[in-house]
C-alpha cells in the first residue's frame, strides 16, 4: 500500500505547484453543462496528477473530474478531483482541495486530500491498513457516543432542506449538541481528527468523497449513504460518523431514498 500512497502524495504535490501559480491570479473561467465552473488550473492539475500516477503505474485506469475515464475497467482505477471547490478557487478563498483516491476491484484503498491554501495547508492521507494522518500526524475520530453531546456538520443544506427527508433531519438538528456547516473537504478532516462527530450531506459525487472515505475509515470512523447504502460510484449523499454514533444518527435518516430524496441533475 505504501508505494500507492507515496505516489498519490507526489501527484497531489504536483497539482499544488500548479494551484499556487494560478491562485489569486488572472485566468479565464468557463462553465460546464451543469453551470459549474472550470478553469485552466483544473485541467492542468488533473494532467499533472495523471502523469505522475501513470508513470508509476502504467496499467492503472483513471476516472477524473475534468478529463473523464480512461481504462476505467482496470483492476486499479484512480479517482481524481483536481480542484474540489472550484467556485471557491475562482472567488479567491481557500476552501478547496485536491482529491485523489485509488480503487481496487471496487474497494477504495488509498486516499489523499490536499488543501494547500487553507491556513498553513492541510494534507490528510490514508491507505488501507496503514492508518490516517493529517500533516504527518496520526489522527483518530472522537469518542463521543451520545446524540446530546454530538457536534454535527451539515453539507449542502439547501439540497437537504428541499428533500422529503428534511423533517427527520431537522429533528436531528434539534437533538444534537451543536450544529455547524463546514462543508467540502474540511468537515471530513475535522471528523477524522476528532473535532466534530458526524456529517450529514447530500448533492455530491464519488470524486468529492472517495479519498475522504479512506481517510475517515482508517481514522476509526464510518461512512455510508444517508439511507445506509455503501459508498460507490453512484453515491450522492453521505452519513459519516466517528464510528460510535452510527446507529443513533442512522435512525434519523434510515428512510432516506437516494432516488427520491437526492436532487435531480
Image: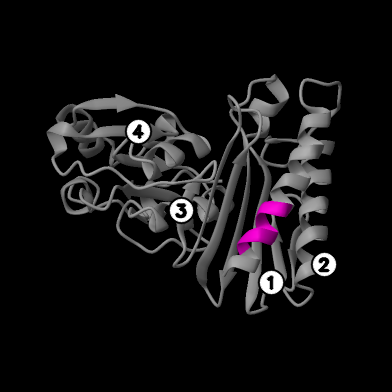
Badge 4: residue crowd in 10 Å (few <14, some 14–19, many ≥20): many
Badge 1: residue crowd in 10 Å (few <14, some 14–19, many ≥20): some
Inter-mark Cα distance, 1 to 4: 33 Å
Badge 2: residue crowd in 10 Å (few <14, some 14–19, many ≥20): few
Disc 3 target residue: 132
Of 213 and 173, nearer the camera is 213
Nearer the observer, disc 3 or disc 1?
Answer: 3
Residue 28: which quarter of the image? top right
Instruction: Give the image location of residue 170, x and y in percent.
Output: 23, 31
Nearer the observer, disc 1 or disc 4?
Answer: 4
Q: Which stretch appears magenta?
A: 5-10
Instruction: Give the image location of residue 253, x and y in percent.
Output: 25, 48
| Between discs 3 and 1, the one toward the N terminus | 1
Q: Quadrant of the N terminus?
A: bottom right
Residue at x-position 59% and y-position 27%: 118
Inter-mark Cα distance, 2 to 1: 17 Å
Nearer the observer, disc 3 or disc 2?
Answer: 3
Instruction: Give the image location of residue 236, x and y in percent.
Output: 47, 51
Helix, strand or loop status at disc 1: loop
| Between discs 4 and 2, the one toward the N terminus | 2
Disc 1 target residue: 72
Instruction: Give the image location of residue 187, x and y in percent.
Output: 43, 36
Residue 211: which quarter of the image? bottom right
Amino acid at each position: 500500500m505504501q508505494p500507492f500512497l507515496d505516489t498519490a502524495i507526489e501527484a497531489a504535490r504536483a497539482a499544488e505547484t500548479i494551484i499556487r501559480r494560478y491562485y489569486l491570479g488572472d485566468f479565464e473561467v468557463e462553465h460546464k453543462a451543469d453551470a459549474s465552473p472550470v478553469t485552466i488550473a483544473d485541467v492542468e492539475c488533473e494532467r499533472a496528477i495523471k502523469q505522475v500516477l501513470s508513470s508509476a503505474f502504467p496499467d492503472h485506469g483513471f476516472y477524473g473530474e475534468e478529463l473523464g475515464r480512461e481504462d476505467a475497467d482496470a483492476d486499479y482505477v484512480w479517482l481524481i478531483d483536481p480542484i474540489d471547490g472550484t467556485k471557491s478557487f475562482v472567488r479567491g478563498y481557500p476552501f478547496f482541495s485536491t482529491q485523489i483516491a485509488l480503487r481496487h476491484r471496487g474497494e477504495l484503498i488509498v486516499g489523499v486530500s490536499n488543501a494547500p491554501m487553507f491556513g498553513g495547508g492541510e494534507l490528510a492521507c490514508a491507505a488501507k491498513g496503514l492508518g490516517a494522518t493529517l500533516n504527518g500526524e496520526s489522527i483518530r475520530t472522537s469518542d463521543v457516543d451520545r446524540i446530546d453531546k454530538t457536534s454535527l456538520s451539515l453539507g449542502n443544506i439547501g439540497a437537504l432542506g428541499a428533500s422529503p427527508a428534511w423533517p427527520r433531519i431537522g429533528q436531528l438538528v434539534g437533538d444534537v449538541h451543536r450544529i455547524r456547516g463546514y462543508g467540502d473537504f474540511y468537515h471530513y478532516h475535522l471528523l477524522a481528527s476528532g473535532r466534530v462527530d458526524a456529517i450529514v450531506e447530500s448533492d455530491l459525487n464519488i470524486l468529492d468523497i472517495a479519498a475522504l472515505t479512506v481517510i475517515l475509515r482508517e481514522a476509526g470512523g464510518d461512512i455510508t449513504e444517508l439511507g445506509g447504502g455503501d459508498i460507490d460510484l453512484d453515491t450522492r449523499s453521505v452519513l459519516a460518523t466517528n464510528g460510535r454514533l452510527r446507529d443513533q444518527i442512522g435512525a434519523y435518516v434510515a428512510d432516506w431514498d437516494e432516488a427520491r430524496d437526492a436532487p435531480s441533475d
